[in-house]
Structure formats: structure tokens, C-alpha cells
Amino acid sequence: MSRLKNDTFLRALLRQPTAYTPIWLMRQAGRYLPEYRETRKRAGSFLDLCKSPALACEVTLQPLARFDLDAAILFSDILTVPDAMGLGLYFAEGEGPKFERPLTDEWEIRNLSVPDPGLELAYVIDAVAEISRALDGSVPLIGFAGSPWTLACYMVEGGASDDYRKVKTLAYSRPDLIHHILDVTAQAVGAYLNAQIEAGAQAVMIFDSWGGTLAENAYRALSLAYIERVIAGLTREREGRRVPSIVFTKGGGPWLEEIAHCGADAVGLDWTMDIGRARALVGERVALQGNLDPAILFAPPEVVAAEAGKVLEAFGPHPGHVFNLGHGISQHTPPESVGALVETVHAWRR
Amino acid sequence: MSRLKNDTFLRALLRQPTAYTPIWLMRQAGRYLPEYRETRKRAGSFLDLCKSPALACEVTLQPLARFDLDAAILFSDILTVPDAMGLGLYFAEGEGPKFERPLTDEWEIRNLSVPDPGLELAYVIDAVAEISRALDGSVPLIGFAGSPWTLACYMVEGGASDDYRKVKTLAYSRPDLIHHILDVTAQAVGAYLNAQIEAGAQAVMIFDSWGGTLAENAYRALSLAYIERVIAGLTREREGRRVPSIVFTKGGGPWLEEIAHCGADAVGLDWTMDIGRARALVGERVALQGNLDPAILFAPPEVVAAEAGKVLEAFGPHPGHVFNLGHGISQHTPPESVGALVETVHAWRR
């Protein structure tokens, strides 16, 4: 078993007792940090940054140098997988991610194949290995991927969407084709996460950013079913240590009890649902990760502390809570707010 | 009591037995109809259309001429109220609604006052009266307003937002100011809805489009509390007939049981929550309105019919269901899909 100085995060995910509530933040390495903006400028584009293992490692470590966080998360993007499938990812200035070759024709869908993480995604796997070496057992490293449904949304829409018209039209008109995309993508995501685990990721998270745009029965069939399949195929243990998994469906509050049965060790909660009520619903089945409204970090430090305290109180004294925001941290967040948050969370149970 | 040939919608809202499940669609008078686009062209801007009682009446009636819908809804916009409060509503091409004078300074917030619906909003009240005369008792007319929180979002942000940074910063940093805005806006919305009822609206709906962006305790304090206040002040009966109220919080699924206690007769559901499960949670307390995913209308008519059937089956044979989409109809919807939907819903219980 590899040395790990701080395993609080991993223990909390497995609902084992911990001395305090661990905390990390979605998108903790990002634009709200001046040092990130510096590195990003040096890298060129966002994608250049993702594709350089050395720079991805550098920005992954930046928030850990500032704040006493209990986990690092690989700096990357969920769309590396469809990019490796040949769709041609690019970022149009101020418009978010786009694909040069979105899936429009049946033959393109039929031709999809599972990329080899060691080839087409080698730059990510190399970054994981480099970060893992640099962390040197200080805190665990989280690997991640997008959920098959979320990736399918981008692959069919060609970018972000506000109504998911193309992908839902496909889903309701040609279920055979959407299930083919999801099937191939689920295999790709599974292989990708296992390669990250092999390279040193000690926990993995599946980001289901767009599952919450589906009707309940469609969520079950198109998103949750494929997340379950990915989780069932994950490497369970590495170097004698269990590798916990976290599933985060934004907007998944109404389906929490079902999500808690998907096989993941922990469920991420967005900020809309009271975490105490969530815990009452899931009981001892899974750990919960979340769920402060990221907008609270715009308020003065004493408000941040008070609101974080409410989340901690709501979850209560049970094991199995990883503190986080309910969504990625905003680029407009004052770094001082993050400092106040981390201190409050760490001090709470001590 | 005024004559009403088809009161199925009103009876369903009051959970009285009906011969079939009534249906209307959010944004049923809109861009997916070629005749709407014609009138809109004649009117000039969207706002010109809203401000002409004759043209607003014309477009309100258009979907009823095509489809056997069980209710008409006033053609207007939720932002008429802040416009009447002096914020200067305008629509930038392709950018959605904006305010010339969003609330930025404390003095602007302290100076807010409740507009007189008979003066600053006379064009809406005149439209209600004109539509009511034109309908001549064929189907009920729904009046509507935005929820105080939703209006406050627009008033502080100055338009749509993807993170609600300004309004949430205000809410968490200066609770006194946000509550002042909500208090004045709740009075304005209440007076506005009562004036619509006085002019002929036979049911009213409160659109809480952005309540779902709040954390659970913030939703309770900033959105639901003010919706309750508006509902408590509504005219209960007019011309010997009860005037039912509907509350629709997009993304409100996790809070359904609380929303069902806000005093409204019916709760609108977005498409993310199974309506059968929703009914099991609210029981006999309120009627439910919803909740087909509007994207299903992009599928072939037989899929539309099958998916609508699932919603009807899920709700079951109880009284108290008004069929609707889970969100406004998309401008890209083929009108034939609406025809198929209305037929399916009407045929289901007959």
C-alpha cells in the first residue's frame, strides 16, 4: 500500500470515521486563482494547458499550495474522450467547447469506436502519473470523466445547448442510435477511468452535468443505466487500497434515492437540496459530497463561515460527508473566501 | 356567475371530477405558430405586441383556433411589472430581456414603489378584458405574473444570468435590501394579479422561473415565502366562481411537498420528476399541472402519443391533473405535434 499522509477524503467517501470533515472544491484549480491565469497565459489555449502533462500538473497543485485542501483533482476536461474519438474538440473564445465533427449522420454514429487511453489519451494518463508523483502521498488524487449521457449531449449537439433539441430528438426518434452512442461512450469512459486509476488516481468522479435535463424515466434509461455500467467495470482496488467512486448528477435531487443505488460509494449533491434531508433519504448507503451554493463565496467571510456551518450542521455528526460546493467554483470568487471556507470546515468538528 | 362552456380546466385545478384530462401548454401562443410570427411582424417588436391589447388578444386566441385546448393564457411577459416600476424593459435582438436601469444602488432599491395596475399596467389589464370578451365563455382565461424572487433576479442582474451572481451576492451580503425588493415586488405582483382577475382572468399562475437556482433554505426564505404572501392576498372568488391559483417553480422537484403547502390550488411540475411519484407525495392537497418534456414534441407523432400516455398513466385516474408541458413550448416545435398531443390527452380517459 502506497504511503498517504492524509487519507481523510478517502475514508469519508467510504463512510469511515474521520477526525474532521474533509473538503475539496469542484474546479479548485481554475480561473479564480491569479497563478492559474498566469500558467494559462503561458500555455496558450485551455486545450494546450490540458494537453501538457507538466502544465496540467502545475495548475493541479496550485490550490493545494494556497489552501489546506484534502484532495487534488486532475486538471483536464470531460470532453477529452469525444475528442479522442475523433470529433475534434476546440474552444471558441467566449463560447465554450465545440466539436468540429459533431455526430449528425447515422454512419458517423455506427463508426464510433472506443479510444485507447494509452494512445489517444496518453497526455491525460501522463498528467495523472506526473501529478501523482508530485503529490508524493500528501493528499489523494481524484481522476474523473463525464457521464456517457453528458458526453453524448455534447457529441450530438456539437457544443453546449440550452434545450438539447438535437440529442433529445435523436433519443426519442432513434433510440437505437442514442443507445449505440451511449454504449460505445460508456466503454470509453470505463477504460479511461481505469487507466487513470492505473496511473495513480486514488478516487474517481463521474460528472453527469446534463443528466438533470432529462425526464425521470429517460434519466434512468439514458444516463443512470450507463453510469451503473461504467461503475460496475471500475477497478475496485489498487495497491491494497479501495478506489472509491463518486457520481454527481447536477439537478439530480429528485432522483437521489435511485442514484444512491447505482454502485458508487458517494453521491455529489448540487446546492438545491438540503444535505440533511438528502442524508435522511440515503441513510448509510452512500457518502454525500457537497453542497454549498458557490454563489455564497461572493459574500463576506463571516457569511461564508455561517452558511458553511449550516451545511455541516444539516449533515450532522455522522461519518460520510465530503464538503464541497454544489457546483464548480466561479471564476469571480475572491480567493479569500475559499480560505475562510476551508478553515470553517476543518474547525467544525475538531 | 358568468357563462362558461368548458370549465374542465378550472374543475381539474380544484380536484373536482372531469370527463377527461384538460390540457393547455405554457407559451401556447408563440413562435412555433406561423400565424403568430405574422402578427409579431406586423406589431414590430415583442414589446409592441405585448403593449397592444388588440394584438395581444389576437395572438392569445391563435392556438385555440388550431387546437382543442382547454384554457387560454394572457399573452404578455413577466417583466411588465418591473418595467412598470421604472426599470425600462427592452429586448436586445437575440439576447433576451434587459433593463435599462437595473437595481445597483441602495437608493434605487429604497425608492422602489408599487405600480398601479390601472395606470402603469393598463395595457395588460385592457388586454385581459379584451381577451375575456373575445373568448365569450368558450374556455377559461389564465392571468399570470412572475414570482417576486424571479422578478428580483432580473431587476438586480439587469437581464438573464447564468450564475445569478449579482442578486445572490446582494441576497447573502445585504439581506435587508433583497427583502425590501421582494416585499415591494410581492405587493406589486399581488395587485397586478387581482387587477387581472377583476378584468376577467378566471385562474392565475405564478411563474417562479428562477426559484430553482436557490439552495433549499434560501428558496424557502426568498422565493416561497413571498409566493405565499402573494397567494394569501389574491381575490378568492369572482362572479360566484372560485379563482384557482397555480404555482410553478422550475427545478422545484426536491421541494414539492413544501410548495404544495403554499396556499395554491395547483402546483406546476417541470419534466424532471415523475408525476406519479409527485402525486404520491402531495396526495389530495393540490392539483398537479404538467409535465411532458417539451423536447418530446420534436419526435414523430406516435412517440408524442406514447410519451404523453406515460404521463397520463403515471398520474392515474384521480381527479386533479391538468396536462401541460414541463416548460414553455419550443419555437422549433412542429404544430402537428401539438395536434397529436391534444388528441391523445383528450382521448385517454374517454
Image (cartoon, coloured by chain):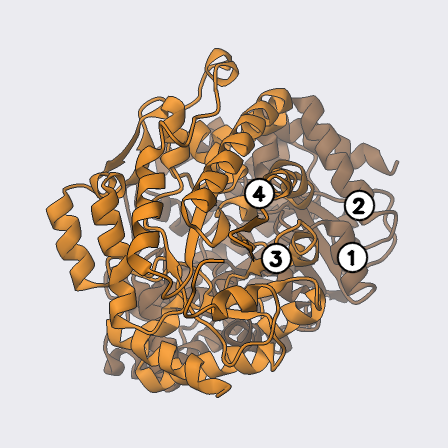
Chain colours: A brown, B orange
Name the mark nearer the viewer: 3 or 2.
Answer: 3
Whether residues under marks 3 and 2 lie with C-beta atoms below 8 angstroms apart, the answer is: no
| Residue B188 position within the rendered picture, expressed as x and y whole percent measured from the top left | 49, 31
| Residue B347 position within the rendered picture, expressed as x and y whole percent measured from the top left | 43, 86
Subunit under mark 3: B
Residue B293: mark:
none
The reply, left or right, for residue A345 in relation to residue B186 is right
Q: Amino acid at mark 1?
A: Arg
Tell me how far mark 4 sits from mark 3, CA to CA. Answer: 12 Å
The residue under the point 25% across, 43% down is: B53
Tell me how far mark 1 sits from mark 2, CA to CA. Answer: 9 Å
Which residue in the protein does label 1 denote?
A279
Name the mark nearer the viewer: 2 or 4.
Answer: 4
Which residue in the protein does label 4 denote?
B234
Whether residues under marks 3 and 1 lie with C-beta atoms below 8 angstroms apart, the answer is: no
The residue under the point 34% across, 74% down is: B68
Which residue in the protein does label 3 denote?
B265
- Of B103 and B224, which appears nearest the observer? B224
Subunit under mark 4: B
The answer to which quarter of the image holds residue B18 is bottom right
Q: Residues within 10 Å of mark 4 (few under 14, many from 20)?
A: many
- Of A133 and B278, which appears nearest the observer? B278
Whether residues under marks 2 and 4 lie with C-beta atoms below 8 angstroms apart, the answer is: no
One can see residue A32 in this view: no
Looking at the rendered structure, whether the residues under marks 3 and 2 are on a common chain is answered as: no
Which residue in the protein does label 2 denote?
A314
Q: Earlier in the sequence, mark 1 or mark 2?
A: 1
The residue under the point 62% across, 49% down is: A272
Dot 1 falls on a residue whose secondary structure is helix
Subunit under mark 1: A
